[in-house]
């Protein structure tokens, strides 16, 4: 199983994760997040990071801004973490460099019927799905959702599992019928927002 470490803000930690061969590096381009990357790194610093799994996380951002940031920072993946509708995704797909993959996030709350409908009727050209816990902050809360819900779905694309993943609940992932393509870890591997605990990540990665 692959690993994405999200909410990166520090160059030395990013290089350490690259040397650990982590598959995806997540950068949050959402101003309200305590992990907003542009408070810590410039566009050209992010552009200079040599890795094929650079993921930009966006929340209800405009197509124009996403395309511009993707170009300026040489992103490989766009993670849509807000309420982006199909029309928006189609427009983004048309304007984005074709090599860039799109990850559409489904924030899982209590409305299971709605989630099932959205998954079954997904028409847009996205490459991956990501399931995270629903919250007012959109993400990075450290809270899990009921992963058993995924066993009620036919998931049409490879997906990232996210939301409060930690060494304590890692074994529960084995009970999901359709296994994740990748795990997305964040706040459970931090000493404070944006500051990663690399030793904890290394130990976790060795278990995957
Ligand atoms: O991490 C944030 O601050 C954040 C804020 C707004 C939207 C998305 C955000 N994070 C995106 C991620 O992909 C996180 O890894 C995901 O939400 C899981 O975080 P956690 O529950 O802390 O493991």
Image (tube, rainbow, N blue to C red):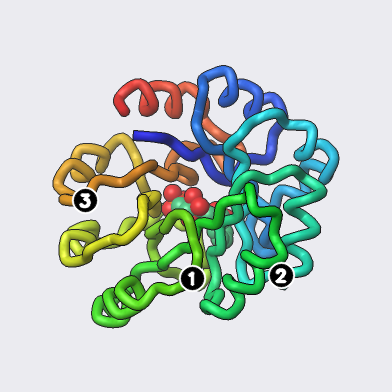
Residue 144 on image: x %, y % = 32, 56
Residue at the location (61% across, 76% down)?
Answer: 88
Instruction: Please report whichever mark, 2 or 3, sits nearer to the chain's N-terminal start.
Output: 2
Choose between 105 and 7: the one closer to the eye: 105
Instruction: Please report whichever mark, 2 or 1, sits nearer to the chain's N-terminal start.
Output: 2
Residue neighbourhood size for the residue with mark 3, other residues' Cα within 10 Å, grouped as few (<14), some (14–19), many (≥20) = some
Which of the 4 image quarters holds residue 120?
A: bottom left
Choose between 120 and 142: the one closer to the eye: 120
Residue 119 on image: x %, y % = 33, 71
Q: Which residue is mark 1?
A: 124
Left or right: 38 in relation to 176: right
Residue neighbourhood size for the residue with mark 2, other residues' Cα within 10 Å, grouped as few (<14), some (14–19), many (≥20) = some
Q: Which residue is mark 2?
A: 63
In this rendering, the answer to whether 9 lies above or below 156 is above
Q: CA distance from mark 1 to mark 3?
A: 21 Å
| Residue 47 seen in the figure | yes
Q: Ligand 1 within 8 A of label 1's CB?
A: no
Instruction: Please report whichever mark, 1 or 3, sits nearer to the chain's N-terminal start.
Output: 1
- The secondary element bearing badge 3 is classed as loop
């Amino acid at each position: 199983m692959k690993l994405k470490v999200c909410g990166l803000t520090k160059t030395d930690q990013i290089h350490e994760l690259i040397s650990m061969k982590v598959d995806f590096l997540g950068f949050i381009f959402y101003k309200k997040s305590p992990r907003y990357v542009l408070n810590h790194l410039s566009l050209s610093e992010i552009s200079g990071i040599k890795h094929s799994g650079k993921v930009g996380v966006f929340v209800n951002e405009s197509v124009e801004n996403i395309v511009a940031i993707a170009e300026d920072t040489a992103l490989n993946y766009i993670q849509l973490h807000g309420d982006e509708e199909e029309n928006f995704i189609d427009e983004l797909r048309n304007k984005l460099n074709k090599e860039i993959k799109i990850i559409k996030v489904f924030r899982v709350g209590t409305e299971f019927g709605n989630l099932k409908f959205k998954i079954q009727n997904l028409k847009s050209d996205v490459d991956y799905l990501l399931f995270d816990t629903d919250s007012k902050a959109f993400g990075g809360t450290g809270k899990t959702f009921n992963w058993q819900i995924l066993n009620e779905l036919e998931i049409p694309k490879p997906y990232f599992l996210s939301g409060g993943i930690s060494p304590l609940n890692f074994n529960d992932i084995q009970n999901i019928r359709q296994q994740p393509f990748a795990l997305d870890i964040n706040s459970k591997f931090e000493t404070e927002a944006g500051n990663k605990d690399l030793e904890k990540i290394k130990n976790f990665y060795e278990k995957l």
